[in-house]
Image (spheres, rainbow, N blue to C red):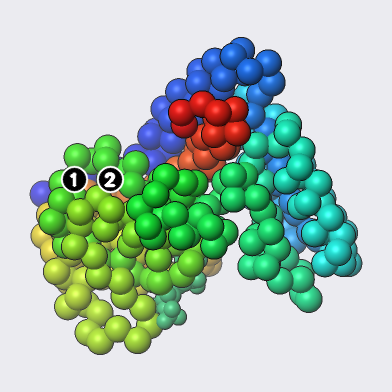
Amino acid sequence: MEAAIIDGKAAAGLLRAQLAVDVAEFTARNGAPPGLATILVGQDPASAVYVGGKQRACAEVGIRGFDQRLDAAATREEVVALITALNADPAVSGIICQLPVPEPLDGVELTGLVDPGKDVDGLTAASAGLLALGRPGLRPCTPEGVMLLLEQTGADLRGAEAVVLGRSNLFGKPMAQLLLAADATVTVCHSRTHDLPAVCARADILIAAVGRPRMVEASWVKPGATVIDVGINRTDEGLCGDVDFDAVRAVAGALTPVPGGVGPMTIACLLRNTLKAARMAAGENP
Ligand code: NAP
């Protein structure tokens, strides 16, 4: 039997529709909408597309956008001054610094300067620490989006074998923490993992975030497993994920496509985090 396709685009659409309602209610209660500031340093075309998409998504749900752009030659002091001003601005609920930033700027250092209460990317040490401790906080958007998709599939995470391929700070590590918090039995793999296919084949939930086109083959997948493909790879034939979709579809129980799977959930979760940050700042229960 073919795997059920997990429609991230539809799920993100539903989430955004609900967020539009919640944002309107928040704005009515507080007299001002949540605000999201995006910081783009330089003219990297891919980053400009991402930032443009985030700003458009904000406008669609009633979040006020602050589109901050700095020249590629901006100094560390200029970026720090901008982040400091946004941290202090009550109209700004969330701040994201679009990565990568041009050298010699240090993206990790700059991201770390964002007020933890406005850290809607969930990437500061404070947010990572809250996640590791199981305390409430702002979670990174892509792993949070994956959790929402898993919830939608009805997959039972308690005690399940979950394998995360990739250990980045952006995705793999927070994904593992969220799965652990949901009582899954979690294995995190990386480039030094021995016998990767055998480890993956144990998984009831297999999540791939490596950045290698179609790396996960059908023989790596346990029959009936839920497979989440986070990878985004540009190939001559167009976009594809880290999972060999056509082959794995015949084995898995449920599978996300690329595009149209995890990607749309990432932006929806960014909007969700911005509302959550605004609620926290307003003293509401997020
Ligand atoms: P990253 O920082 O480059 O991390 C890649 C991870 O994959 C590393 O932990 C690396 O291991 C591991 N890896 C690389 N080659 C491997 C191999 N042959 N076998 C096993 N593990 C291997 O990437 P990332 O930021 O986590 O992103 C991963 C992918 O997800 C990319 O395609 C990215 O575009 C995509 N992504 C998508 C979204 C979305 O919204 N859909 C969001 C974020 C990322 P080592 O640590 O040992 O080097």
Residue 5 appears in the picture as rendered: no
Image point (16%, 70%), residue name: 201
**Do the residues under discs 1 and 2 have CB atoms within 8 angstroms?**
yes
Q: Nearer the viewer, residue 23 or 232?
A: 23
Q: Nearer the viewer, residue 226 or 71?
A: 71
Q: Quadrant of residue 203?
A: bottom left
Crowding at mark 1 (Cα within 10 Å: few <14, some 14-19, many 20+): some
Crowding at mark 2 (Cα within 10 Å: few <14, some 14-19, many 20+): some
Measured in 3D between alpha carbons, the distance from the residue under mark 1 to the one under mark 2, in whole angstroms, is 6 Å
Query: The disc labelled 2 sits on which kind of residue?
Result: Leu
Of label 1 and label 2, which has the lower sequence position? 2
In the image, 284: left or right of 158? right
Residue 201 appears in the picture as rendered: yes
Which residue in the protein does label 1 denote?
155
Image point (48%, 67%), residue name: 169
User: Could you tell me which secondary element the residue under label 2 belongs to?
Assistant: helix
Which residue in the protein does label 2 denote?
150
Figure label count: 2
Residue 98 drawn at (x, y percent): 67, 56
Residue 278 drawn at (x, y percent): 59, 32
User: Could you tell me which secondary element the residue under label 1 belongs to?
Assistant: loop
Image point (51%, 18%), residue name: 21
Q: Work out which residue is located at the far top of the displayed protein and give it.
A: 28
Query: The disc labelled 1 sits on which kind of residue?
Result: Ala
User: Is residue 195 placed above or below 188 in the rendered structure?
Assistant: below
Image point (51%, 26%), residue name: 284
- Can you tell me which quadrant of the image ligand 1 is in? bottom left
